[in-house]
Amino acid sequence: MKQLLVIIITLISSVSFAQEIDKALQKSNDYVYDGNKLVDEDFVAAEKEYRKAISEKPSNISGAYNLGNAYYKSGYYSEALLRHLESAKSATNKTDKHQVFHNIGNALMQQKQCKEAVEAFKNALRNDPTDDQTRYNLALAKECVKQQGGGDDDKEDEDKKDGEDKEDENKDKGDYKEDKKDGDDKDDKDGKPKDEKGDNDKESPKKEKKKQRQQPKLSPQQVKNLLEAMNNQEKKVQDKINAKKVKGVKVKTEKDW
């Protein structure tokens, strides 16, 4: 009887905890929704709502993602980059990862960190090999690297990486369609508006805001380290998935006679 009572109490506690998590997520999404309504008219008020969303549920990708987009549209590219790097840690499906890395690439391009932008766009394409806009932005980033004086050694490394990435893209094309179903269900309220994703927005920021805000600056090495860490994490996840697939294959134990 005592054991049964313990089980019942544990179940009730688990249900209550799950409800609390759902409540926090809903509240976070409500703040994002309010921020999206305000962002075009009142950046400061929208920023406040997005920060509330992040505070309420830090693991909810929508808060950091939408705040990153808002910073980008207002010309605060360093802050946009920081928020998109933050949201990349919470991205769980290919659609989210693709959009986040695309926007990381855009923010890096605005800061002329072209080599790092190339890697970000490649990461985006690994998660959605079908996006022509990302492919176009990748071509722009590569051209930017050339203009910045990328040497022959860089070109050899680039060609080698391109070959490997091409293989990854082809391998991922099949997986992408299934993941896309999960990502496409998100709307502006609990998902992510595609305002930034799609082009390199060239809206000029308001001068008053620029004077008020001191932008943090990530060094190219810091960005490179962050992208590499995310890349390694992505590879670990893929290795686990592949291991499960291999484990699930039925092995024939009897000989054919």
Image: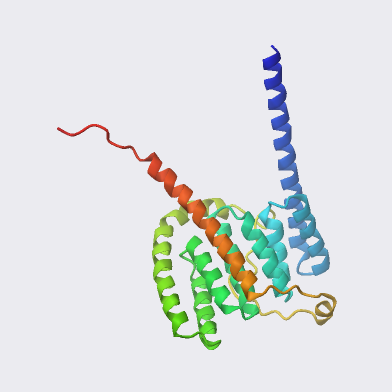
Q: In which quarter of the image is the C terminus?
A: top left
Task: Report if residue 197 is visible in the image.
Answer: no
Q: In this view, does 226 lie to the left or right of 140?
A: right
Q: In this view, does 8 lie to the left or right of 127?
A: right
Give percent across and percent down for residue 202: 66, 80
Give percent across and percent down for residue 192: 65, 59
- The answer to which image quadrant residue 63 occupies is bottom right
Q: Quadrant of the N terminus?
A: top right
Give percent across and percent down for residue 173: 42, 59
The relative height of residue 250 versus residue 126 in the rendered view (above or below) is: above
Give percent across and percent down for residue 13: 73, 29
Question: For this rendering, which residue is in front, 253 or 213?
Answer: 253
Question: For this rendering, which residue is in front, 135 or 191?
Answer: 135
Q: In this view, does 253 lie to the left or right of 158?
A: left
The relative height of residue 21 versus residue 32 in the rendered view (above or below) is: above
The relative height of residue 30 versus residue 11 in the rendered view (above or below) is: below
